[in-house]
Amino acid sequence: DADVTQTPRNRITKTGKRIMLECSQTKGHDRMYWYRQDPGLGLRLIYYSFDVKDINKGEISDGYSVSRQAQAKFSLSLESAIPNQTALYFCATSDFGAGVSGEQFFGPGTRLTVL
Amino acid sequence: GNSVTQMEGPVTLSEEAFLTINCTYTATGYPSLFWYVQYPGEGLQLLLKATKADDKGSNKGFEATYRKETTSFHLEKGSVQVSDSAVYFCALTALNTNAGKSTFGDGTTLTVKP
């Protein structure tokens, strides 16, 4: 079974709709991240969480919100979707501490289309 | 702040050609360096990593050496295959800076033709 899972894998929605993307992990990592990937722009960090009570904005958080329901679950919400939020969204996790390299473990991605 | 600059793509090669994708970085402290690969329709996965200067990471015929003096981590493969067609991301994590978050390059798309 995959260590980091994302649901849904694909979603088409309309402008103004609220949508939630979900991420679950079995890695046991405290740190979780949401990224957005657009062609030619690489990965951009939306939000990150270092534990259940620690939520932080990334470089492009406007229009997004997150919820860390448990160590294993981190959800991304678009309160009112707009077409320029059409992108590929990735969840990732990482470990932290002495002897850890900082490698990130990615989910398979959610392709979101906002019409 | 930390930054990663990698060779712009796209890169198109014939099968069995030699591959180099350049990557340079700016970071305070002693970062770990990574190459991630994204195959079509999939998420990113670790290809190789190096955690200290002069370390060589290797996997699936790919290699990269952590060069602190030139702040570089260039990816190489001696003979590419069609199955290597993917997007390659160089990244760093400096656990003592930037709150331990990773910094990614913009990605380089590689297409290998038979």
Image: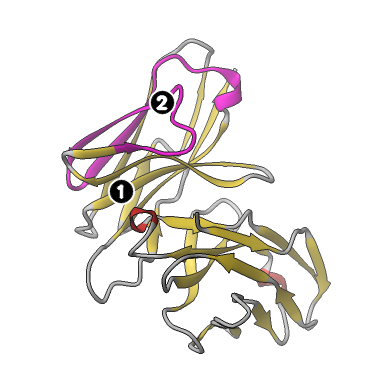
Left or right of A36 in this view: A107? left
Left or right of A104 in this view: B54? right
Q: Which residue is mark 2?
A: A64
Q: Which residue is mark 1?
A: A32
User: Which percent across, then down, holds residue A108?
Assistant: 45, 50
Residue farthest to the top? A16
Total residue callouts: 2
- For the C terminus of chain A, which image quadrant? top right
Q: Amino acid at mark 1?
A: Met
Instruction: Kindly indicate the quadrant of the structure image that contains residue A20.
Output: top left
Query: Which element carries disc 2, helix, strand or loop?
Result: loop
User: Which percent across, then down, holds residue A58?
Assistant: 42, 39
The answer to which of A55 and B27 lies nearer the viewer is: B27
The answer to which of B16 and B3 lies nearer the viewer is: B3
User: Which percent across, then down, holds residue B103?
Assistant: 49, 56
- For the N terminus of chain A, which image quadrant? bottom left
Q: Residue at x 73, y 77 (%)?
A: B20
Badge 1: residue crowd in 10 Å (few <14, some 14–19, many ≥20): many
Query: Which element carries disc 1, helix, strand or loop?
Result: strand
